[in-house]
Image: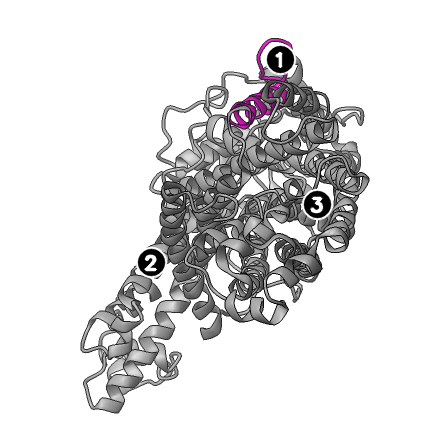
């Protein structure tokens, strides 16, 4: 965060446009790192150059962008992507030391770099902690908050409050897991390009399946929320105008189209989420007033008295058979993991501490608002509580219509948050994350991008030996801007650019079902049961296990080896070493000394086995305790092994392909924002996440089907 990083830039020779850049070893020798002499850079990149030297026949100008998930066994493909993303032009004939004037390092802040792997278009605007918190609260307190009373009706009062607290704690923990693993994990900090998206993080331990799993469920969550927001507009604005709920369908649909087209769609056209900070603050304020209204005007006293008093209600209304329907709604209400990376990337000076502030205060405020509105709304109507609790209030009263206007205002300002996520998913799948399209790849914008990357645009460049200092200043100044600030957006249809095209497409996709459906309850419940369970619980838990697979296997191996020693079983040396943290590696025996009389004698080569393979072999060799099977550890170990192998392989391939030789992207300055080694409790939490998510997914979908088939969601049932 805020750390200036040196990245090598591969430049082309303008004097030789037909030059063949397939010899990547030659390319690596044209790089310098951290302004070191070229000989030092050659030494550091020789191994990486050899690793990608099989890229025969490729030329600089015809390199195609690599897909979202690059094959790990082909580092050259990643290297080709770097050539495409880092295209630049020469800037002079020579330098003072007689080396090629194109050599040098381009210092750039890693938050302003274009993501190398996916061509992700980064935000141009940043938010403060308050602005990021407002955006996150706005993402949480959307349509879900108005369905909290219905969730308590489905799950039961006590069970619903317990689940709300549990979901809030899980949401806060998972938000920090995702961003901390991506931004502050020691191994990811050494990557040539930062991990900036949920799906990119998932691709490290689980490859294409991981990224596809995340993208699918992100879209489910965003799309379901967008439909729910439009349904609330359909419930509120026409009602205020005199068209009661359940009547005048044509007029209500027309009003929905008008409001969404004139207000919600233009807000969704924004490029960066930071642009929504002000509207998000207004939306959160409207939510607070809405909660106050429900608490003040809900007929709690009359309803409670009619049903035998508060004591009887609390005794009998504990847990209902439709518990998991309520859990689905609560998961939808609190889920914001699909927006986590968009909000975190918009946070200025992103650190672990600042991100924790954002999540803590956002989740706490959202949980309090949900609890107050849920309890007051449910106690006011009990079994008559509808999916949109405002539909329980009489039509025509000033107070109720005021609350409907506030809810509509909240939906108008929250809809763009989910539209951003849905648009991001589709652009990742179709365009590999390149939202700006670099002006449609016109020659004019290609030239602008090349000039900006070199610092030529508006800054000039030197042509001789005496201009070295000016060249350095120009390159540094150029990094204060992103390519998107200069390049005109393109790539869309008709007169629209790519961002506008996909925004309109997502809007139309969400508008159609909202014109056909009237009940928001099933929409919220199914969205939470499917997308919420996967994106909020299963995904973060599996990612943590996979990324930290080596540490997990080491701990399990050590525990099993300890159990074997206590039981008198033979232990494997690898397990003992893992358990003893390598304490006996330093011992030397006579057998280790050179053989007398043979000057050329060498010690036999050691078997170079990865820590993952060593721990996994130790676990599977020999007897195992009962808790290993009862705790489903064969499954957890298999997940950890797969994740560790794939993560190591992808990180090594990325580092080798970019020719960095393992040089860290940030200086080793003792920064506190590096994650500590995972503890047993951390792994326990990740396993609980997965189990909770699987149960809520299966039971939630099953409960929704049962409720719909038996009509149990109807008012009064």
Along the line of sight, the residue nearer the viewer: 332 or 392? 392
- Alpha carbon separation for disc pair 1 and 2: 47 Å
Q: Which residues are magenta?
A: 490-514
Label 1 crowd bin: few (<14), some (14–19), many (20+), radius 10 Å: few
Along the line of sight, the residue nearer the viewer: 535 or 670? 535
- Alpha carbon separation for disc pair 3 and 1: 37 Å
Task: Give how far across and how far down residue 340 sits, in percent.
Answer: 60, 48
State which tag comes first along the sequence, 3 or 2: 3
In the image, is 125 to the left or to the right of 592? right
Name the residue beneath numbered marker 3.
135
In the image, is 466 to the left or to the right of 247? right
Find numbered disc 3 in the image and state the secondary structure of the residue it sits on.
Answer: helix
Residue 565 seen in the figure: yes
Instruction: Tell whether position 15 is magenta.
Output: no
Find numbered disc 1 in the image and state the secondary structure of the residue it sits on.
Answer: helix
Question: Which mark identifies residue 443?
Answer: 1
Depicted 26 relative to depicted 678: above or below: above
Task: Give how far across and how far down residue 438 sits, in percent.
Answer: 62, 22
Name the residue beneath numbered marker 2.
639
Depicted 712 relative to depicted 361: above or below: above
**Mark 3 or 2: the one toward you:** 3
* Mark 3 and mark 2 residues within 8 Å of each other at the beta carbon: no
Label 3 crowd bin: few (<14), some (14–19), many (20+), radius 10 Å: many
Find numbered disc 2 in the image and state the secondary structure of the residue it sits on.
Answer: helix
Task: Give how far across and how far down residue 650 sits, in percent.
Answer: 41, 48
**Mark 1 or 2: the one toward you:** 2
> Which quadrant would residue 13 be assigned to in this image?
top right
**Residue located 79% across and 47% down the image:** 285
- Alpha carbon separation for disc pair 3 and 2: 34 Å
Q: Main secondary structure of the magenta part?
A: helix
């Amino acid at each position: 965060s805020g750390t200036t990083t040196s990245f090598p830039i591969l430049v082309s020779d303008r004097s030789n446009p037909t030059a063949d850049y397939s010899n990547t070893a030659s390319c690596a020798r044209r790089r310098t790192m951290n302004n070191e002499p070229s000989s030092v850079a050659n030494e550091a990149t020789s191994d990486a150059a050899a690793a990608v030297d099989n890229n025969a026949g490729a030329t600089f100008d015809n390199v195609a962008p690599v897909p979202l998930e690059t094959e790990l066994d082909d580092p050259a493909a990643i290297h080709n992507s770097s050539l495409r993303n880092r295209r630049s032009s020469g800037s002079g004939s020579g330098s003072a030391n007689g080396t090629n004037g194109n050599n040098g390092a381009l210092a750039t802040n890693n938050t302003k770099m274009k993501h190398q792997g996916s061509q992700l278009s980064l935000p141009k605007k940043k938010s403060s902690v308050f602005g990021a918190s407002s955006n996150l609260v706005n993402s949480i307190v959307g349509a879900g908050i108005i369905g909290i009373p219905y969730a308590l009706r489905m799950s039961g009062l006590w069970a619903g409050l317990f689940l709300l607290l549990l979901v809030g704690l899980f949401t806060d923990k998972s938000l920090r897991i995702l961003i901390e693993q991506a931004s502050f994990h020691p191994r990811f900090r050494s990557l040539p390009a930062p991990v900036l998206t949920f799906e990119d993080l998932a691709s490290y331990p689980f490859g294409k399946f991981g990224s596809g799993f995340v993208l699918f469920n992100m879209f489910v969550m965003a799309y379901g929320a967008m439909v729910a927001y439009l349904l609330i507009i359909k419930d509120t604005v026409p009602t205020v105008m005199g068209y009661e709920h359940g009547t005048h369908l044509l007029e209500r649909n027309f009003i929905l189209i008008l409001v969404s087209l004139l207000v919600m769609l233009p807000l969704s056209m924004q490029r960066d989420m930071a642009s929504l900070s002000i509207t998000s603050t207004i939306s959160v304020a409207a939510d607070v007033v809405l909660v106050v209204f429900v608490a003040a005007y809900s007929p709690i006293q009359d309803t409670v008295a009619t049903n035998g008093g508060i004591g009887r209600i609390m005794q009998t209304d504990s847990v209902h058979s439709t518990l998991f329907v309520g859990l689905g709604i609560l998961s939808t209400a609190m889920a914001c993991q699909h927006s986590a990376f968009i909000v975190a990337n918009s946070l200025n000076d992103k650190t672990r501490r600042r991100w924790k502030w954002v999540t803590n205060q956002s989740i706490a405020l959202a949980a309090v608002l949900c609890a107050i509105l849920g309890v007051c709304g449910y106690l006011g109507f009990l079994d008559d509580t509808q999916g949109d609790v405002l539909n329980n209030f009489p039509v025509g009263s000033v107070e109720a219509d005021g609350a409907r206007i506030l809810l509509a205002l909240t939906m108008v300002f929250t809809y763009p948050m989910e539209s951003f996520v849905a648009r991001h998913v589709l652009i990742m799948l179709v365009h590999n994350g390149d939202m700006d399209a670099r002006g449609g790849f016109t020659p004019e914008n290609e030239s602008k991008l090349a000039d900006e990357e070199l610092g030529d645009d508006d800054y000039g460049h030197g042509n001789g030996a005496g201009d070295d200092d000016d060249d350095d200043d120009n390159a540094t100044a150029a990094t204060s801007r992103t390519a998107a600030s200069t390049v005109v957006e393109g790539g869309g249809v008709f007169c629209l650019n790519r961002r506008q095209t996909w925004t309109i497409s997502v809007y139309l996709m969400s508008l159609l079902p909202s014109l056909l459906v009237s009940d928001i309850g099933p929409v919220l419940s199914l969205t939470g049961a499917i997308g919420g369970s996967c994106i909020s619980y299963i995904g973060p838990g599996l990612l943590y296990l996979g990324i930290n697979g080596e540490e997990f296997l080491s701990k399990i191996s050590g525990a099993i080896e300890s159990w074997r020693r206590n039981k008198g079983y033979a232990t494997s040396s690898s397990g003992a070493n893992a358990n003893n943290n390598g304490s006996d590696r330093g011992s030397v025996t006579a057998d280790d000394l050179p053989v007398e009389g043979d000057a050329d004698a060498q010690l036999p080569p050691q078997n170079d086995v990865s820590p993952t393979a060593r721990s996994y072999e130790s676990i599977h060799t020999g007897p195992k305790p009962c808790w290993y099977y009862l705790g489903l550890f064969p499954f957890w170990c298999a997940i950890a092994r797969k994740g560790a192998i794939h993560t190591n392989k992808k990180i090594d391939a990325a580092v080798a392909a970019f020719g960095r030789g393992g040089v860290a992207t940030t200086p080793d300055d003792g920064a506190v924002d590096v994650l500590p080694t995972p503890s047993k409790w951390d792994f326990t939490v990740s396993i609980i996440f997965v189990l909770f998510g699987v149960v809520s997914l299966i039971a939630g979908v099953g409960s929704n089907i049962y409720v719909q088939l038996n009509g149990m969601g109807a008012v009064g049932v």
